[in-house]
Amino acid sequence: MNLIALVGNLATNDTLQVVALGSVGLGLAGGVLGTFAVLRRQSLLGDAVSHAALPGIVLAFMLTGTKAPLVLVVGAAAAGWLATLAVLAITRHTRIKDDTALGVVLSVFFGFGLVLLTYLQRQPSAAKAGLDRFLFGQAAAMLRGDVVVIIAMGGAAIAVLVAFWKEFKLLAFDPDYAACLGYPVRILDVLLQSLIVAAIVIGLQAVGVVLMSALLVAPAAAARQWTDRLGVMAALAGLFGAGAGMLGAVISSTTEHLPAGPSIVLCASTIVVVSLLAAPNRGIIWQVLRHWRHQRRLGLEALLCDLLELATHHHDPEHGHSLSALAAMSGGRAGLKRRLRELHAKGLVRPVGAGRWTLTAAGRIEAARVAASHHPARHEDGCPT
Amino acid sequence: MNPGLEIQMVAVIVAAACALPGIFLVLRRMALLSDAISHSVLLGIVLGYMVTRDLASPWLVAAATAAGVATAALTELLRRTRLVHNDAAIGLVFPALFSVAVILISRSVGNVHLDTDAVLMGEMAFAPFNRLSIAGFDAGPVAVWVMGGILLINAAVMALLYKELKITSFDPALAAALGLSPTLVQGVLMTLVSVTAVGAFDAVGSILVVAFMIVPAATALLLAERLRAMIAWSLGIAVASAVAGYHVAVALDANIAGAIAMTLGAVFAVALVLSPRHGVVSVAVRRWRQRRLFMLQMLTIHLLHHETGDEAGRECAEQTLDQHLGWSPEQVRVAVRRALRDGLVRREGPLLVLTDAGRARAGEVLEGLTV
Amino acid sequence: MTAENRVIPALQVEDLTVAYRDKPVLWDVDVSVPPGVLMAVVGPNGAGKTTLIKACLGLVRPAAGRVLIHGRPVEAQRRNIAYVPQRGSVDWDFPTTVLDVVTMGRYGALGWFRRPGAAERERARQCLEMVGMLGYERRQISQLSGGQQQRVFLARALVQDADLFFMDEPFQGVDATTERAIVALLQDLRASGRTVICVHHDLQTVPEYFDWVSLVNVRLVASGPVNEVFTPNHLRTTYGGRLPFLSQRADPKERAR
């Protein structure tokens, strides 16, 4: 499967266009709002809310008798919102910690929903099948109506977030300070929480409960690695989410037996892995490189100092020092020749006869500078170990 | 034995087996790891099946357990990079592993009994159909034997490592200093959680395992002060809810595990409201009482601070106390009435004056409070 | 007495009692701070110093008593108060830059929906210059040393153009250079008529840095000018018997040399 075929498929396939558009909208909303969930250490809120939404969906259906996307989404949002309030109330009023409260609310709500769902399914009435689709997600079965809801609700949530951007930023970074400036922190908190709930529930149908939590966490966690600005992070997270949605939907449509939800999640996970490894500065590869470079510089500086020390003991600056003497000082021959070659290339040392080395004039100045400056004393001359 | 009793037996055993490791998950603030593990054991089951092509193979259990432990390890590894927080680490790992599992199922195992619905919801009602027969003799449902074994393992390991689990849960630093490896204990606990999640899979599915593990322990936390009492409460709640939940499910003709989770939730809610020490009602009553006592103390201390000095006339007048203390006139009236009744203050014209008893009381309070 | 009474105090705390849950942390505290002083709030750990400040800022609700700022309730004076929280109170890995954090000080004056613009950023730069952090605007805040983070918080408070400053341990974990720089800045603020109230830990430096002091240990032990109130007797009452270095407390002039 090549890229051109994928894009061609997207241009011609009507169903795919709907699915891809819906997935992009979801990824965008999940990424942007997930930024705040991740920064406020509420990454697992998505998990809890999406599970807790089940009874709301079933009840909404039981009350209205329709499966219109908007009705079910409203039911899901109500239950999800109730669940976040329950978590908040439990942690505030008892000694139960937030992870346990999340677990309790998530599983009990889900259990309740499951009872309702199975109860409903065993009743002799029509038009109930397909409710569970909401749970486990069937992106490929997305309809225009679903996409309209996703885009309308996701767009509205992002619009509110942008309108209160400054306030939410302050709330996420330093709530006490926000209160000092006179902002109603409680109200802002509930508002932000509601936006996050909205972003979660609109995604349930497309990617399912388990996988929606990934769309809230993964794009934001990936975006955090690339930037140190909140605005850029939110935009990047939206972009990553939308990209994962698009790519996942397209790949799934062109491959047999590849469900869209998991495919989207794996795309998002891939973005996370790449970001964790390769993002400049924070990425693991950069960290390793930085560490390695630092070690190498320290090694060269230590060698310079060793040569300087040998030279001061000899009174003859021209005297060449053997490898074994240097090895004895630095505790081993490993890498010694390489380091000498490097210093030689920089013009700081020069060979004197076979296998014997001494500092050049420039090397002496450099070694003295290193010894005098930033290193903690190894000997009285202050050379690094 | 009739199927109803057998199902109840399975329910009770599953509930008890899950409740045990759940206690330590809750105490270690790792409750949601149970959610992550119960999802990713699916990947182990699928991989195990792809190798053995046998759904009954014991290797499946081993593979699933390994997947569970790997989830915990991956989460920890991700956290240690310090690039993401702990909660995000969990939220990144298990959806990815779960997605891989779902994709593998739909691509290569398609027509075998491993549909995602069953995985997520479980169905306890099928338990009596899968029977263990030894040499033609019917030994009851397989689930009873499997979960019974897991229950025994959980109980045995926790009895053996009781002290270690306890110390590493409350004070990992101390545990490390005493030479107990928190990492090792953690590994053991994660293995128990994984094995239990795998075993409970058929009966309760991957999401309700969380309810079975976390809710009894969370409820016990509201009712018990000591670890041993907490374990007893957890087991009691788990068993009682399993039986009650079964009957709810039968009455509604609904999913049994879901009904048990619902019952567990109801018990939790009752404890939340009525627990004698930590319940919302008793806390509110205690607050109210303490607030009344506290207001009395505030009044005496206020009078003590201002009984000398030229502002006494202003600060200690009964009429203006509400302004000085920022209380409502009603609050002032109640506090003054009690103080008069207890003989802590007396009226002198418009002023309230501390009696010797009142002065002694205020002094005691201040003495006791200084840090 | 008469002269002081006519001036409206910058901060007036009346009969303030604060309790967390059921545990009282401050009992019936009365403090009156005249404008234009640099005050230290001193007391042992857990004595309620931070709580006192938070109650003054309206961040915790008192069980009794009230707080007046320039004669009016806090809610009406938000624009006139600046706050420097403890450095550990925020997540320094938050994706934001130095300039961004300092600009947050203008959010109160901006009000709802309006975004900070060039004017706000310019003001933020001026304040960064005052704390010697110009040139760090684009740094991510986790890449700063403890002292630098403290200076950023200070700049954020300066940007508010307030006349009453509350600071929670501004010298906690900063190096000696930063400490001197911060003290100089605080003394400048006082010189320009502002009032500064600091939770402070180091008893030795109180007479050198501050001219006003409140000694707190759940209740108020004493409050007033340093040379009247900062006496061994009051300190002993505040700290109980646990003040071994009290006798060796260096003379301020001695230390300055």
Image: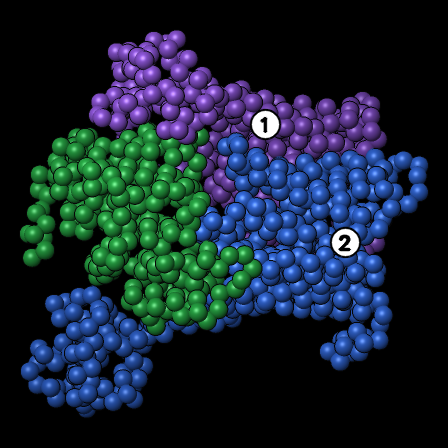
How packed mark 1 is, by other alpha carbons closer than 10 Å (few <14, some 14-19, many 20 or more), is: many
x, y percent for residue C49: 31, 39
Residue A320 appearing in the image: yes
Q: Is C252 positioned to the left or the right of A115 in the image?
A: left
x, y percent for residue C79: 41, 53
> What's the coloring here?
by chain
Chain C display color: green
Label 1 residue SS:
helix
For residue B272, the mark is 1
Residue ranking furthest to the bottom: A353
x, y percent for residue B261: 69, 33
* Same chain letter for marks 2 and 1: no
- Give me the chain that's blue: A
Residue A100, located in which quarter of the rendered image? top right
Q: Nearer the viewer, residue A60 or A247?
A: A60
Quadrant the N terminus of chain B occupies:
top right
Quadrant the C terminus of chain B occupies:
top left
For residue A205, the mark is 2
**Measured along the vertical axis of the image, is residue C197 above or below residue C97?**
above
x, y percent for residue A336: 28, 78
Q: Is C116 positioned to the left or the right of B46 in the image?
A: left
**Measured along the vertical axis of the image, is residue C175 above or below residue B155?**
below
**Measured along the vertical axis of the image, is residue A250 above or below residue B350?**
below
Residue lying at 82% horizontally and 29% vertically, measured from the top left: B252
Q: From mark 2 to mark 1, how far is it between C-alphas?
A: 33 Å
